[in-house]
Amino acid sequence: MRPDLEDRVEEEVAFPGSVHLRRWQQFLTSRFGLDRTPVVRKVIIAVIGFTVLLLGAAMVVLPGPAVIIIPIGLAILASEFAWARRILRRGSLFVTHVRRHRWWPRNR
């Protein structure tokens, strides 16, 4: 095999079954040894993400910044799950669509 193909295969084996990890995610997963156990990493991220998401959902009724906390929870979940990435993408498209209307106050 060519040497450049061997390196690419070794990179894919380092994080099997995961999405493309950012630099801070690679640091944390290697620091805590979660790169060897992707299922445990996925469970930990799911628990943290759903906890933040549930706190945001509770802040819809209770006083608090639910509009800020819910997207943060979805962003945490989007680091591992495609359905959360789709929800975030749809939300950002909705916000850009709403901002294009004339009735939305713009900073000039």
Image (cartoon, rainbow, N blue to C red):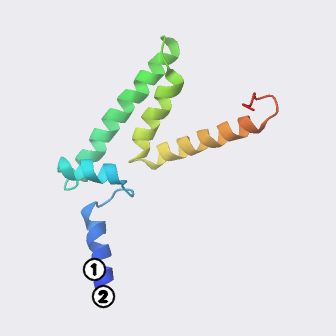
Q: Which amino acid does label 2 sit on?
A: Arg
Q: Are marks 2 and 1 in contact (CB under 8 Å)?
A: yes
For marks 2 and 1, give the CA distance.
7 Å
Q: Residues within 10 Å of mark 1 (few under 14, many from 20)?
A: few
Image coords of residue 54 (percent x, y): 41, 25
- Locate residue 38 relative to residue 33 in the image: left or right: right
Image coords of residue 103 (percent x, y): 81, 28
Image coords of residue 22 (percent x, y): 37, 53
Instruction: Point out which mark residue 2 bears.
Output: 2
Q: Is mark 1 on a helix, strand or loop?
A: helix
Q: Is mark 2 on a helix, strand or loop?
A: loop
Q: Which amino acid does label 1 sit on?
A: Glu
User: Label 1: which residue?
Assistant: 6
* Position of 23 relative to 107 (above/below): below
Residue under the image location 21 percent in, 53 percent down: 30
Residue under the image location 82 percent in, 33 percent down: 102
Instruction: Point out which mark residue 70 bears.
Output: none
Residue under the image location 54 percent in, 46 percent down: 86
Image coords of residue 80 (percent x, y): 38, 48
* Position of 55 relative to 98 (above/below): above
